[in-house]
Amino acid sequence: MTEIWDIYDRYGNRTGRTMKRGIPKEGDYMLCVHIYLLASDNRFLIQKRSENKESHPGEWDITGGAAISGESSVDAILRETEEEVGIKLDEKDLYYAGRFVKERRIIEIFFAKKDFELPDCHIQKEEVDKVAFVSYDELVGDILMKRGRSREYVELVSKAAMEFLHGENS
């Protein structure tokens, strides 16, 4: 079944139009969500994208995806986390880190801390090949930079991660 996504303007407002899963037209935006999920020992969960994915197959990344029509960014991140890695979060677990806008995408970024181990993850094979834990340094250097995230995105995530790790988000 083809996913239907809401179309947004550059400022994150729904336009009232929808589109089938794909790439928005020039001037239109889709809502994406990313979550940086920490285990109780402050290691970040990463996932290796399935080799069958259209974009970035086989690359290590964080959990995320696109919001389905009618979903808020919170709804989308809770769904994506449970679908892709089998970790159930509650809205109260989420720390909103910020918004990053790039061509045709609005990315809402979240952090959450949860007491879990890798065997607790139940991965969605269509999306994810495997999961692992990494340190903050490995996340920023080995995952985000190698994945080709922009400098601005990495700076936003790095700052938010340090605030989250040191409890400055309370």
Image (cartoon, rainbow, N blue to C red):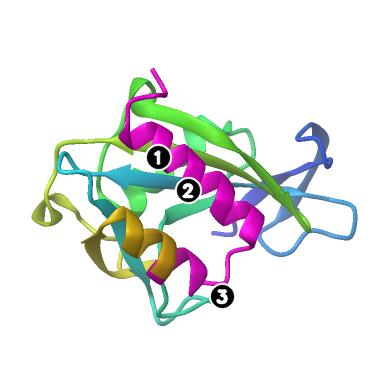
- Are circles 1 and 2 on residues that touch, CB within 8 Å? yes
Per the rendered image, the range of residues in magenta is: 142-170
| Quarter of the image that includes the N terminus | bottom right
Q: Which mark is residue 162?
A: 1
Q: Position of residue 32 (x, y in %)?
A: 60, 48
- Are circles 3 and 1 on residues that touch, CB within 8 Å? no
Q: Which mark is residue 49?
A: none
Horizontal arrangement in the rendering, residue 123 relative to residue 18 (left or right) = left
Q: Residue at x 50, y 69 (%)?
A: 145
Residue position marked by numbered label 2 in the rendering: 158
Q: Residue at x 63, y 33 (%)?
A: 70
| Quarter assignment of residue 21 | bottom right
Residue position marked by numbered label 3 in the rendering: 55
In magenta stretch: residue 11: no
* Magenta stretch, main secondary structure class: helix
Q: How much space separates mark 1 and mark 2, taking CA atoms? A: 6 Å
Q: Is residue 78 visible?
A: no
For disc 2, the neighbor class at 10 Å (few under 14, some 14 to 19, many from 20) is some
